Image: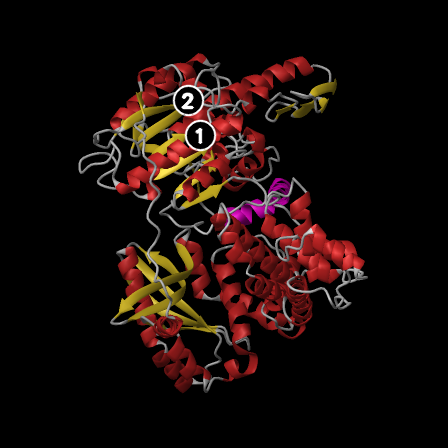
Amino acid sequence: MEAATLTFNDLLELTESLLRDSPGAREVLQRRYQRLFVDEFQDTDPLQAAVLLYLTANDHAEPDWRRLVPATGRLFLVGDEKQAIYRFRRADLEVYRLVRDQVSSSGGEVVELTTSFRSLPGLVGWLNDAFEPQFESHDSRYQAAYRRLVAELPEKREAGVYQLRGRAGEGSRQEQAREEADRIAVFIAAALRGGTDLNGADSVLGETASPGDFMILTRTRRYLSEYSRALEERGIPYDVTGAGSLRSSGELRALVDALEAVLLPDDPVALIACLRGPLCGLGDDDLYRLRKAGWRFRLTEDAPEGLGAPLEEHLGVALQGLRQLRCDLDRRPAAAALERFVEGAGLAAVAAGRPAGSSRVGNLLRVLSMVREWQGRHGFDWARIASCLRDLLEEDELRVEEMTLETGRPDVVRVMNLHQAKGLEAKVVFLADPADRSAARQTVDTHVSRLGKSPYLSMAVTMSGRYRPVVLAEPEGWEQDQAEEERFAAAEDLRLVYVAATRARDVLVVSLPAHRSGGPWSPLDQQLSGARELPVPAADTPLPPRSSPSAADFAELRRERELSLAAAAEPSYCQVVVTEEEELAAGETDPETRGRGRSYGTAVHRLLESLATRRLEGLDEAALRAYVRGLLVAEGLDPEALEEAAMTAIDRFRESELWGELRAAGDDVHAEVPFGEVRGEGVRRGVIDLVYRVGEGAWKVVDYKTHRGEGDSAMESLAACYADQMAAYCEHWERASGERVTERGLWLASSDGADRYISL
């Protein structure tokens, strides 16, 4: 954990093991998390499902989560089994249905939601007619049940389903994808100008469309770059997701070559690779001249004289840049040094001017962000960083999502493979790359039975073949296991198409190959027979470039930036914490604050919070002391010096009348309740330490203080000091609860054995 080497799956396995083997952990966490709400439940895997059942079932001793039943009202699930498309991540219908049945057996209710608030009526009806018979034709053990959707939204003119059929003689799949990408980009560019049949005041795209109205989906990621290229050529902003790793990034390769050249200054191979790359741009003839002149290609040696211009000048600039990078790496954080190098070398500017420039620069920014994380979070030195960047180039399994300059912007065309599209939507969705037949060539080589009496893995041993894997060995019963997995896969393939098609709000465009049948969208072929052809304009006019001054006034730009920064530095509102003035006044005279300080006060607050919310119930004295020591250490305090004081605070709190009232309040106990309210031009914030019910429609508010408060006069002084703070707490709670606060007071945890409650 401290080394930050645990994966997400490691954390799941450790959590599941803890809850399975520790009834005490279940009990403590159930008191803290009394109700669980889970969205997209169809994407839940067995480990996650186990955690949910361990946290919601009354039986704390049963280790098998499949036998547990959630307590009434503790588990709320939202999911759609028609959108279960992550079997490869262990999430499938079997887990979904098992937990659903467990909820039902506990008295829970299954409510079917069939109203669509996303898609228009014509599109919803078409989807129902396309998918209902196909879902129902599958064996229900492997396929979701289909319930027809009902549209809530009114219809719009020109909305519905269109087809985009490929043209004859298109050639390879890549050539077909390139031609289709151009046609899609032409349509989008025309729609942005208001030049399609779908534009108009009362039409689906309005007078002019916005880039954010469009989404392009493919089944696989292989040719996503074709669609991003077509959009960029026409000046259409886009964001590509799921395009794969950074292995093809020329900018990353140039950066790695530069790092290795300065890391290994006496290695001629590293320096030559950098000199031949885009950062320096020397050709083989130049390198030959340098070798003939006797240079040994070492960064520590000066270049030979008499080379003549422009080689001498070109090489001098390159070596100066690399030596400056080495100097910066020795004197600055690695991330800062690399950012300075990228800026000085103009790497980002050059990348922006090349084809797919937005993706190139976005990927470069992604790499620099990763370097900052490796350095700041993991403490990597620059040699380790260079090694990690080299791995990104050479290790295919190290996939890092690409990005563009528009990543994160809402008003862009989104381009992605369909596994990335879950939960997203767009006014117009293109189901693209119809020549992709990779799914038909995939073979099953693994079957996992997760929920049987004895879960097992069945796996064939294969090697790569020309068209499909060749089986070298297989386990007993493999034919049955393979057939079972193929049925699961066929059902999920249909659900993948359903998920893709239901991303559309108003218009769905399905691309079809020119002649051959099949492809990723083939389940829609029959229903598409009557669909209209998408009216793609013949003319292809790029969008006008964004306006920019012919000659930039840098002094004016600098002045505007400084004014903007100054304005941003001015607070737009004043934030006041209700405890600030009171704590300051009390701290000036209180010996407790002067003696142990705020860190001890924070530790006591956390301790009393845990007591009030019953998190410490069931702990014996040894475990309780261990918990106390942990709190003190977390606040930077000496547990040897303060452990007994903290234990005394626990004893006094449990002996007080407050403790009995808390026990009587049951579940109506709330600790550390934050609030905020607008007061004039400021925002007043605070945190209520403790509030609990003391009768029908009545509440009590208590604030913890670590003041000694010696003598009656000190008590009166403290009461006066915190009166306004407590009044603000009570006022907020009455507004939030709709009921009255009938009692308020301070609990003084003085740690000298004289802890007490002061009623205000």
Image: magenta residue range: 8-31
Which residue lies at the image location 68% right of the left edge and 70% below the top edge?
327
Q: Residue furthest left?
A: 202
Residue 672 placed where, x, y %? 43, 62
Residue 357 belongs to magenta span: no
Please tell me how crowded label 1 is: few (under 14), some (14-19), or many (20+) other residues with Cα within 10 Å.
Answer: some
Please tell me how crowded label 2 is: few (under 14), some (14-19), or many (20+) other residues with Cα within 10 Å.
Answer: some
State yes or no: discs 2 and 1 in contact (Cβ < 8 Å).
Answer: yes
Residue 25 belongs to magenta span: yes
Image: 186 above or below 352: above
Q: Is residue 740 visible?
A: no
Question: For the residue labelled by badge 2, is the local secondary structure a helix, a strand or a loop?
Answer: loop
In the rendered structure, the answer to whether residue 685 lies left or right of residue 519 reads left
Q: Nearer the viewer, residue 215 or 184?
A: 184
Name the main secondary structure of what is drawn in magenta: helix
Question: For the residue labelled by badge 1, is the local secondary structure a helix, a strand or a loop?
Answer: helix
Q: CA distance from mark 2 to mark 1?
A: 9 Å
Type of the residue with mark 2: Arg
Image: 137 above or below 229: above
Which residue lies at the image location 55% right of the left edge and 63% below the top edge?
343
In the rendered structure, the answer to whether residue 149 lies left or right of residue 617 reads left
Which residue lies at the image location 29% right of the left edge and 34% below the top edge?
117
Residue 22 placed where, x, y %? 63, 44
Residue 147 placed where, x, y %? 35, 21
Q: Quadrant of the C terminus?
A: bottom left
Q: Nearer the viewer, residue 452 or 155?
A: 155
Q: Which residue is the site of mark 2?
A: 167
Q: Nearer the viewer, residue 179 or 610?
A: 179
Image: 47 above or below 443: below
Q: Nearer the viewer, residue 36 or 727?
A: 36
Type of the residue with mark 1: Glu
Residue 179: give its label. Answer: 1
